[in-house]
Amino acid sequence: MDARKRAYGSCALLALPLSHMKEPPPMKLYVTYGSPYARLARMVVLEKGLEGRVEVLEAKTRTAGSPYYHINPSGRVPYLVDDAGIGMEDSQLICAYLDNLDGKPRFHHPLRESGWAYRRLEANARSLCEGICVWVREMTRPESERSPTVLAHEVARSERMADLFEARACDPLMEAQPAMAHLTVAVSLDMARKRGPGDLTNGRLQLAAWMHRMSDLPAMRATALP
Ligand SMILES: N[C@@H](CCC(=O)N[C@@H](CS)C(=O)NCC(=O)O)C(=O)O
């Protein structure tokens, strides 16, 4: 039995050409192009070859009355609406969801995910990312509203975290096939260099070499910060 007959039974609809059959609606991924969290989700879409299933849409964040708030009440990106119309926020959840769609996760290896060493690394990576985001956000405020204390605190944090990753850059875990922890460190370092307090790989030779390798990932290039 052909697909139309299975879907609709024997009726007049069978006279319709196949092109009239309903495709599952594409998933929608709401992003901003400067957000490192949204970039993680965009990278997973590309690395998993999901471009045909996921439509990437730019959201208007941080704007009073933005129509985006009707889609995602938190107003944050990334936000994914799956093909059943169910919405979810948070890059960790969205990346895991997208990576698992084909049942063969590449960035969430089950054994690695349950390993404490890997989970500690990913927590460090997210901590680096969050601090850099705070710095960038503070800098988007009018100069008179910026807090030099917050800025200095985040610069110091980012330096300490960069030292931590410099010391670990040659660990087998850091050198392993990229998983979410690796993607998160890479987007954070890129954000720090282009929008943040500066290039955290300067003077950190191991981290610089590691970042150089990560920058070759096709999805890193394709999602480069505007
Ligand atoms: N924990 C969230 C953080 C997401 C987040 O903070 N996104 C920022 C952009 S980097 C955002 O949407 N900000 C808009 C707002 O705060 O209204 C995740 O991992 O997705």
Image (cartoon, rainbow, N blue to C red):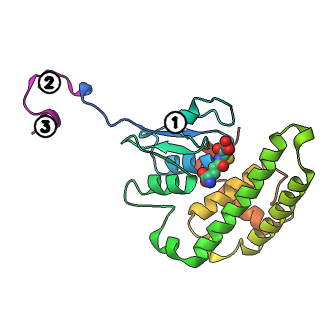
Left or right of 167, for residue 174: left
Residue topped by disc 1: 71
Q: Give the CA separation, mark 3 to mark 2.
A: 13 Å
Asked whether residue 95 is drawn in magenta, I would say no
As drawn, the label of residue 13 is: 2
Residue 15 rendering spot, x and y as whole percentages: 13, 22
Q: Give the CA separation, mark 1 to mark 3.
A: 37 Å
Residue topped by disc 3: 2
Mark 3 near ligand 1 (CB under 8 Å)? no
Q: Amino acid at mark 1?
A: Ile
Q: Earlier in the sequence, mark 3 or mark 2?
A: 3
Left or right of 55, for residue 11: left
- Which quadrant of the figure has residue 18? top left
**As drawn, 169 above or below 45:** below
Residue 149 rendering spot, x and y as whole percentages: 90, 55
**As drawn, 169 above or below 88:** below
Q: Earlier in the sequence, mark 1 or mark 3?
A: 3
> Mark 1 packing: few (<14 Cα in 10 Å), some, or many (20+)?
some
The residue shown at (51%, 61%) is 107
The residue shown at (57%, 61%) is 180
Tell me, yes or no, whether the two marked residues, 2 and 1, touch with CB atoms within 8 Å: no
The residue shown at (86%, 58%) is 155
Q: Amino acid at mark 2?
A: Leu
Residue 174 rendering spot, x and y as whole percentages: 64, 70
Q: Secondary structure at mark 3?
A: loop
